[in-house]
Image (spheres, grey):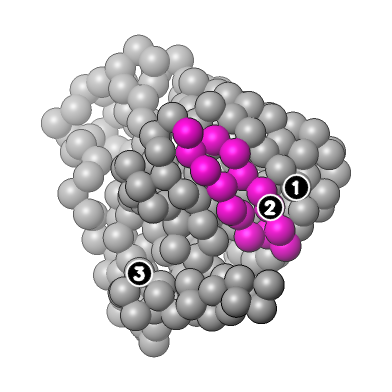
Amino acid sequence: MLLLLLLVFVALPLYTVLSGQAPLGRDYRSADRSSAGIAPRAENTPEAVVQVYHARALNWRGIFGVHTWIATKPEDAPEYLVHQVIGWRLYRGLSSVVSIPGIPDGRWFGNEPTLVAELRGEQAAQAIPRIIDAVASYPYANEYKVWPGPNSNTFMAYIGRQVPELRMDLPATAIGKDYPINGSLLDRTPSGTGYQLSMLGVLGVAMGREEGFELNLLGLNFGVDFVNPALRLPFIGRIGVGEH
């Protein structure tokens, strides 16, 4: 048991730092927020587009988890809207939920984004109004906690449940994705392909086609993806097919 605890709470966090997954000491004022070149340029893409991304959080928070966001571009729109939860906005008396024109695949304070889900064309066009409705109805717009939630990953999981065609498979490092909506014990997984049982986001279990099997202990997720064989681990994420 002691060796297991050392592995989880020492070796895995240390690996995220030494491997460069979670760089430390970045100044948020000068960190790179430019496009990673993943998203199609709006001016060259007439079709509707929806994309979901995650990237390591800034500095020490990145050791533990990721920040997630969703970008939408209706048909023939000249720009993307980026929808996300940003906790510090609450200190200014603002909603934590923000939807503004922006770079859909921007680096999160220097950390590279990973594409989680994407819709194009008619499927995206039909989903966008429902995404906008989900953004507007998010119940924790005036609350934010890094752990165990509600946070940016709680927000993204909520959108995934409202728009299941996204099949949003959030990584094990998306701490807060299991935080229950309105205190419910049972809910669909963020991908909409299964169900989860969660007690305040700190203890639970989930099973879904996209997520596979996941066990949540104190907000840390341990799991196995059976469809695309991989381990899903806290701190380091996914090891196996389609690593992210």
Start-end of magenta stretch: 212-226
User: Picture coordinates of residue 208 (x, y %)?
Assistant: 59, 30
Residue drawn at x 40%, y 38% as measured from the top left: 229
Q: Is residue 82 above or below residue 233?
A: above
Residue 214 highlighted magenta (yes or no) = yes
Between discs 1 and 3, the one toward the N terminus: 3
Q: Which mark is residue 216?
A: 2
Q: Is residue 183 visible?
A: yes
Mark 1 vs mark 2, CA separation in Å: 5 Å
| Front in this rendered view, residue 62 or 48 | 62
User: Picture coordinates of residue 68 (x, y %)?
Assistant: 48, 51
Q: Secondary structure at mark 1?
A: strand
Q: At label 2, which amino acid type do we have?
A: Asn
Residue drawn at x 39%, y 53% as measured from the top left: 239
Residue 57 highlighted magenta (yes or no) = no
Mark 2 vs mark 3, CA separation in Å: 22 Å
Q: At label 1, which amino acid type do we have?
A: Gly
Q: Is residue 35 above or below residue 127?
A: below
Q: Secondary structure at mark 3?
A: loop
Q: At label 3, which amino acid type do we have?
A: Gln
Residue beneath disc 1: 204
Answer with the quarter of the image where residue 202 lies: bottom right
Between discs 1 and 2, the one toward the N terminus: 1
Between discs 2 and 3, the one toward the N terminus: 3
Q: Is residue 150 visible?
A: no
**Mark 2 Cα within 10 Å, few/some/many (few <14, many 20+)?**
many
* Label pair 1/2, CB-CB below 8 angstroms: yes
**Mark 1 Cα within 10 Å, few/some/many (few <14, many 20+)?**
many
Residue beneath disc 3: 21
Answer with the quarter of the image where residue 186 lies: top right
Q: Nearer the viewer, mark 2 or mark 3?
A: 2
